[in-house]
Amino acid sequence: MCGIVGYVGENQAAPILLDGLYKLEYRGYDSAGIAVYGEEGIKVAKARGRLKILDEMTHGGAMLPGTAGIGHTRWATHGAPNDVNAHPHFNRDESIVVVHNGIIENYLKLKKKLEGKGYQFCSETDTEVVAQLLDYYYDGDPLKAITKIMHRMEGSYALGILFKDHPGTVYAVRKDSPLIVGHGQGGNLIASDVPAVLKYTRSVYFIENEEIAKLTKDDITFYNIDEEVLVKEPSEIGWDISAAEKGGYEHFMLKEIYEQPKAIADTLNPRLKDGRIVIEELKMDDEEIRQIHKIFIVACGSAYHTGVTSKYVFEGLARIPTEVDLASEFRYRNPILDEHTLVVIISQSGETADSLAALRLAKSQGVRTLGIVNVVGSSIAREADNVMYTWAGPEIAVATTKAYSTQLIAQYLLALKFAQARRMLPEEELAGYIADLRKIPDQVEMVLGNKEKIQKFANRYLAAKDIFFIGRGIDYAISMEGSLKLKEISYIHSDAYAAGELKHGTISLIEEGTLVVAVLTQAELYKKTISNMVEVRSRGAFVMAVTNSGNQEVEKTADFVIYIPETNRYFTNSLAIIPLQMFGYYVALGKGCDVDKPRNLAKSVTVE
Ligand code: G6P
């Protein structure tokens, strides 16, 4: 939610800021702005809408000369997305300027106090309060003013700040919103995420909560809230900028769909050694695993959908009771946790506010926690007792595909590890599952071969009003994700139903020609789901089916069928989701939607 960047160095700041913001646009894109410190002091340009508008308005940044600056791309929380509410925000005499990602929860109280002291506000944002609060405490020493406001602000923030009295210096501070510092040649940078600095450096510092960074052209100094200097070590990023670029694909989403075989293999292979599953990061021996009597999987969005699948996998393979919760529900429902519980938090970004809060809740009760996270060094990765990384690489499209696929793989591995430790799987069966795991990357590749067929079919549904997805068991979990993919990027209303539940109300929505997508990968449930397909078909529905190869029987009831290669009943999601991702993509493409940046959404949801 919102992306921030900052630069100070030998080069012109504005083009570097714009370039960095393009890499962060996935975080929010309803308005953008930059502030640059030039010969005539601090100049700000901001505009409602996509970054491209600001880019054109400033002639690629040329209208704001200067070698130090900060920038912002916004996902509106406080106040409508308009020019006034766009960041950066000034203090009253325009001598301090701020960009912000996060929410200052007590901003109204602070605003009232400042108004009482004569301050006036022009925007509806919480960020302007930060700028004015800095003004209130500022006596010539930026560090002192920053630590003072840190004591007053409640909520989350990553801030980039310029002070007119301190040319050639960018200040940054964070609490519960991500922020990194890049150490470049001839200049230093701040950013909400690594891709924004990768063009200039692979050497980055991860700023911890309540740490402050002071950047000049040649120096980076870190401080804690007591203004003491901190010594920090940089980390080297293991991938380069090409991983975060489209590389010839029309959209990041399509590129990421096609990257799935590799992402799955990268997540899988390091954990398969000599025919065994080795998850060193788990840091639990078999006896400790046997002490776990219950698993909670907690996540948001698509990550939650992977958890819905994994419940079946954990319970089926390891026979361990597993609950799946939306993080936003878990955190407020007073869950029953004890020393025999493992809480698994799943998150691509590692920054999702509700997932982070759920993790903290579990930790506060002394419960063992495991993060399954994609972004290295993110908050959930750092705060969980142990972290198992998914090696999907940078995911840029708002609608997740490859991170989702790798989250499934991580959970299959974990379930097999638990099954092994709990002695629920004879050796030969375990070997069979491992063999099936190894086949998944190639099988995904095969399913991707259906591209043309799916695109042609998708083009028939560009004007659809409602599209329903149905399935039972794991097929229901697959349906949930298929439905989400479609609706989030194509804006066509869609719902997923447990197939047997349709007749309890939703079937009244079926009209002549309504598309119903049925998922049938669980052989023991084929007949049951086929009955539900017959029910909707006899009410006029057109039925698309995704099923295992060999289930030709389905052609009697479905109008269009996509087959997936044979695997065991637990791993089918990894294959069946691929045609549904492609279907969503091609419907959105055909409708001319902005596939990578769907309206109202953001990839990293750092607000509640
Ligand atoms: C947003 C994204 C989804 C994602 C969800 C959880 O809504 O658009 O794709 O599944 O957040 O994000 P996380 O980073 O925690 O996996």
Image (tube, rainbow, N blue to C red):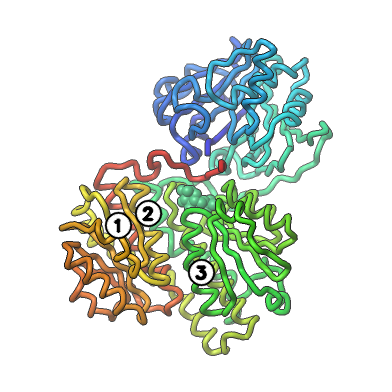
Could you tell which of marks 1 and 3 lies nearer the N-terminus? 3
Dot 3 amino acid type: Ser
Residue 310's tag is 3
Q: How many marks?
A: 3
Q: Nearer the viewer, mark 1 or mark 3?
A: 3
Q: Are marks 1 and 2 in contact (CB under 8 Å)?
A: yes
| Cβ atoms at labels 2 and 3 below 8 Å apart | no
* Mark 2 residue CB less than 8 A from any atom of ligand 1: no
Q: Residues within 10 Å of mark 1 (few under 14, many from 20)?
A: many
Q: Quadrant of residue 138?
A: top right
Q: Earlier in the sequence, mark 1 or mark 2?
A: 2
Residue 186 seen from this side: no
Question: At 59% from the left edge and 10% from the top edge, which residue is drawn?
Answer: 40
Q: Which residue is mark 2?
A: 485
> Mark 2 to mark 3: distance in Å?
19 Å
Give me the disc on residue 583: 1
Closer-to-camera residue (459/605): 605
Quarter of the image where one finds residue 293? bottom right
Q: Is residue 66 above or below residue 465?
A: above
Q: Earlier in the sequence, mark 2 or mark 3?
A: 3
Is label 2 in a helix, a strand or a loop?
helix
Q: Which residue type does callout 2 highlight?
A: Lys
Where residue 256 appears, as percent x and y from the top left, is 42, 54
Q: CA distance from mark 1 to mark 3?
A: 24 Å
- Mark 3, Cα crowd under 10 Å, few <14 / some 14-19 / many 20+, is many
- Residue at x 59%, y 27% (from the top left corner): 126
Q: Position of residue 250 (x, y in %)?
A: 33, 46
Percent coordinates x, y for residue 97 in the rendering: 62, 20
Amino acid type indicated by mark 1: Phe
